[in-house]
Amino acid sequence: MKEEKKRGATNDHLANERTYLAWVRTSLGIMAFGFVVEKFALFMKQMSVFLENSTIGYSVPPTPGFSSIIGISLVGFGTLMSLLAFIRYKNVKNQIDSDTFQPSSILNILLLMAVMVVGIVLVVYLIQSL
């Protein structure tokens, strides 16, 4: 019986670690997306300058720069999410050790709210750029 309980705790810790690593992958993905959004804005600014200075005479209309703000915000959010994931991992580890685990969905709700806000901002931005 004692061996079975020890195996169960080990499985719980391994599942906790897998969950933590999934959150880290998600936060890295969000940071990478933010980096791409920011660098694309820089690329568009450089292309605009290049095309204005070329003999073609074509000009790219200036954008208000919201993509830079969105990109930087995504990188910051991904960083914050990785910190919250680590805190959650340590809390769950301590709860498993003391056999007092209580499920919490705060991190899930924060991620949902942030993704919804980013999605709405991107939709509004894309509609305005039509």
Image: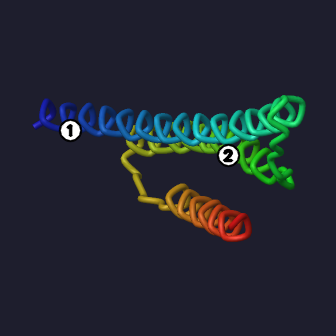
* Colouring mode (rainbow / by chain / secondary structure / one colour): rainbow
- Quickly name the residue at label 2: 74
Q: Position of residue 38 (x, y in %)?
A: 72, 38
Which one is nearer the viewer's eye here, 93 or 4? 93
Q: Which quadrant of the figure has residue 78?
A: top right
The residue that appears at 83% across and 52% down in the rendered structure is 61
Q: Please rate how many residues cluster around mark 1, counting C-alpha atoms within 10 Å: few if below 14, some from 14 to 19, many from 20.
A: few
Residue 22 falls left or right of residue 64:
left
Q: Which quadrant of the figure has residue 15?
A: top left
| SS class, disc 2 | helix
Q: Please rate how many residues cluster around mark 2, counting C-alpha atoms within 10 Å: few if below 14, some from 14 to 19, many from 20.
A: many
Residue 129 falls left or right of residue 15:
right
The residue that appears at 89% across and 30% down in the rendered structure is 53
| SS class, disc 1 | helix
Q: Position of residue 1 (x, y in %)?
A: 10, 37
- Quickly name the residue at label 1: 8
Q: Amino acid at mark 2?
A: Leu
Q: From this view, report whether residue 3 is shown above or below residue 123.
A: above
> Which of labels 1 and 2 is toward the front?
2
